[in-house]
Amino acid sequence: MPIALKPGSLKDPEIAALFRTEDPESYFADLREIGHGSFVGFGYSWPRMCSHQKDVIWWEAKWNDIVKEVKFLKNLRHENIVEFKACFLKDHTCWLVMEYCVGSASDILEVHKKPLREQEISAICQQVLHGLRYLHSLGRIHRDVKAGNILLTDSGVVKLADFGSASLVCPAQSFVGTPYWMAPEVILAMDEGRYNDRADVWSLGITCIELAEKKPPFFNMNAMSALYHIAQNDSPSLPVGSWSSDFHDFVDQCLIKDPALRFSTETCLLHPFISSARPASILFDLIQRTKLLVRDLDHFQYRKLRKLMYLDEQQSGSSAEVSSLDSEDIDSVDDDLCAESASSRSDSYTSTQSLCGAMRSSITSVSSLKKAQRSLVPIVPLADDSTTSPLSRTPPPSGSVDTDTDTDVTPPRPSLTPTAKTASMEMNHEQQQQQQHQHQQQQQQQQQPSIVGPRRRKEEILAWRRSRFATIRPTVTIAREQTEYAAENNMHEQMSGYKRMRREHQKELKQLEEKFNSEMDNLKMKLDREYENLLLQFHKEMDKLHVTHRQELDKRLKTNEELERKLRKAIVQQQEVEMKALQMQLKKEYKVNKERLKQELKMENSSKSFVEGNLKTSKQNHLHVQAEAENRLLADHKFYLDFEIRKLKRRRLLHYHQLEQDLIREELGVRGRQLQSAHTLLRRHHELTRDLEMRQLNSLQNLRCQHLQKQHASELQNQQAYMKRVQDELRKKHAMQVKQQPKELKQKELQIRRQFRQAVKTQTRQYKLLQLQLTQDLPKDEQREVVARLKDEQKRKLALLAEQYEGSIGEMMEKQTVQLETWQEEEARQTKDKLNEELELLMAFQSKQRMQMDQHHEREKGRLNEKVSLRLAVLENKMDDEVTQFERERQDRLNQLQTRQNQELDVFDQASIHLGFSLIALSASSSSTSTASGSSSSATAVANKPGVINSASIQDAIHQQPTTDNSFQAVTAHHHHQHLSSSSSSKQRYELLEEDYRKNYTL
């Protein structure tokens, strides 16, 4: 027998057909990284494809996730779903080649730093809904719809991406998705049941709020806390602002908590917000604007870095490297224009690393520009080995959570700043930088000469080469993703652990349910075998009883035949003796009569002839009388024989009927006991099944309670770790602020002193001008006095000014210190209140979960009790029906037997009447004989049994045949009279014979 392959094994032809074994680097060149996710890197290569490269960690879960995603993508073909190209498997790295897109909707928000317009959101949602409708028509769920997974092409076509969290079946029951975008039924999937494709509509509604507000609801709190908010609070809504009522209504319909009342994709497409008219090129224009802004931002960062490096090299006295900064790329343009060679890709993967490394090493040597350096995002070099630094692309904020084998967790990165004040200040600072940069660009464009030199042309050519893979992702964003990927991601670890715990819980519950099903199946098989064995035993017992009854009936028939034969033989023998005795007696009487006649004739002295004549006449009379007597005796014997045989047959028929009744009652009694035994067994089976179900339910509920306790402990631990991390970061931030405060105060003090020196210089110039005006018309004697007075006045005012500035410095330092302490205390208090509120919310949610679980358990117990009660009631009804049916069958069989026996007895009696026998005599004889035989049946019971003639039946028989009975009685009386007159001893013998017969042959 062949060994079964492990699920997802490459030895499986179906799995092996999903992957290509060629070297992907021979197909793709000029590989560059454009993004990074939690365990996936994204890059692009020269063919217009996106090489989506994943690390293949040879775990069953991770590998099965990759196989599932490849299977999912390979069967999808839709305009609004990213196109699957191929999948390569090289060493331990999986290269997933897909259609290239310029960026995602979250990238547009990141670049513009402001929400999208309503028509742009409507256009994006319309195409997303078309893609979701296609997925839902195939019975699949995306489960991770968000702005980061909504990609756009150069032409403005929206495409759904990232199917690592998708479900191949609908409905599903796994904890999958990104926390802030997850639907309530997905969060509670393992507790309350399954969910369907309406979960994607909820995520789309959250995405609309994200596109309108730049971030989803609850994004300023911990991801775990967001889950509790979503699960137990009211649905979020679009903030009141400049948005239309159709937009508000669309978001509200998408965010209805009850999935049954929530819009479907078909209904969403018919909503006025989606179906309203809009310019066809609105998304194309948005992409072009974003690309221009990204190019300007990258150019601004590049120029800013060049300026810093130039200042650094000017201070160090060497400008050779600065002059070669641009020449490396620009000088290679000539080679690029001549031919495409390996050395022409100066902006490729490795050259970009070397350039970034040179710039970073130059920047870190400038100690006087640390503040400027902090404003720049550091550029992390890419690893050369693709297996150690896989390429992927997951725009921030990204992540997905999974409790089954769907995908790895990629949690979002919420802001760890306790208040929104710092974030808004940073945003304002970035906007000011952008405005300043745009203003500088306008000034530079106005100052540029109209004649473009060769260097400018080379720069344009180089820019055109770089735009072969135009993207709306700024370099700063890519570098930040690399940095965040390299740094420790505590949230990722928390969500991964939480996902693993939920997956283990689900696995344990599934295993326990399978064990319970196996136990229940085994119990059912055991009970069924026991019941079948009992029925088989009953069947064998009934077969044996039927054989026994048949043997008894056959034995009774043989006994009846033997008794009839013996009775006939005895009566015939007795009648032969009586006939011989009659003949001997008649012969004796003839002799006596003859002698008497001879004597009488002799006394009368009759003649011999007269005597002979009389003797001859007497002999003839004697022969005639003898013949008549023999005939009478023969007739009497025949009647007596027939009567006794008939009487015996009737009596044996009644006994046979009684035996049939006893046997059928015995059979029915056995069947009743069998039915009772079967019902007792069924009740015991019901009790065993009920006990097993109760025991299984208690075990399942105990396991759920254990899982809930572990889950709550893990959630509290994660929340406490999050609170500790936030507080530690806040303390570090405050310590850094305290550490930086003297330097900042010193800078402000120097600034005030510079203002003081400037004010002193200004007053000195003013006094000089005043002195010149006042002394130009006065004599020299008065001039000295005026000059001295002005100098005194100047000294006094300068001293007063110096005192004011010193006071301003002291006041400024005191104010800044107090403000910093107050702000830090306020920030610490707000952070503590916020964290405590989240902790209280978590504890309230856990308490609600426990209460809901208890209620759910009570409902389960109630449903099980109802199920058991209903099953017992059905069983009892079925058993009652069987008992009723058995009683009906019992009565029917008894009635049928009685009817048949009555018919047989009626036929027998009719034949007896036809033969001339008295029915009363036969019935009386049979009844008296049956009573005398010691039968166990009572008079009442016998009267009710079939085959027993009661007084009513006798009267009916008498009324039916009155003439025949009377004539039969007359004939019988005549025969008995003649027989008694002829011989009294014969009567006595007859009576003795009948009495002896009754003694010997009565049953």
Image: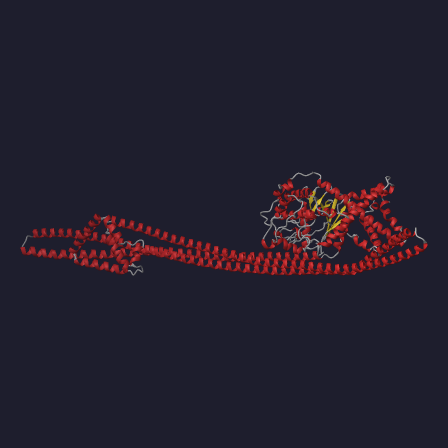
Q: Picture quarter containing residue 843?
A: bottom right
Q: Position of residue 265 (x, y in %)?
A: 62, 44
User: What percent of the width, then of the height, locates residue 936?
Assistant: 31, 60
Q: Position of residue 292 (x, y in %)?
A: 77, 43
Tell me which residue sits at (5%, 55%) in the image: 604
User: Outermost residue, right direction?
Assistant: 780
Q: Is residue 403 visible?
A: no
User: Which of these two is toward me, 416 or 925?
Assistant: 416
User: Considering the image in quadrants, where does the C terminus appear?
Assistant: bottom left
- Tell me where residue 550 appears, x and y as whole percent: 38, 55
Front-most of 276 and 95? Answer: 276
Total count of labels: 0
Structure colour scheme: secondary structure
Viewer-proximal residue among 590 and 506: 506
**Residue 106 drawn above or below residue 741:** above
- Asked whether the viewer can see residue 956, the reply is yes
Horizontal placement of 800 versus 984: left or right? right
Quarter location, residue 747: bottom right
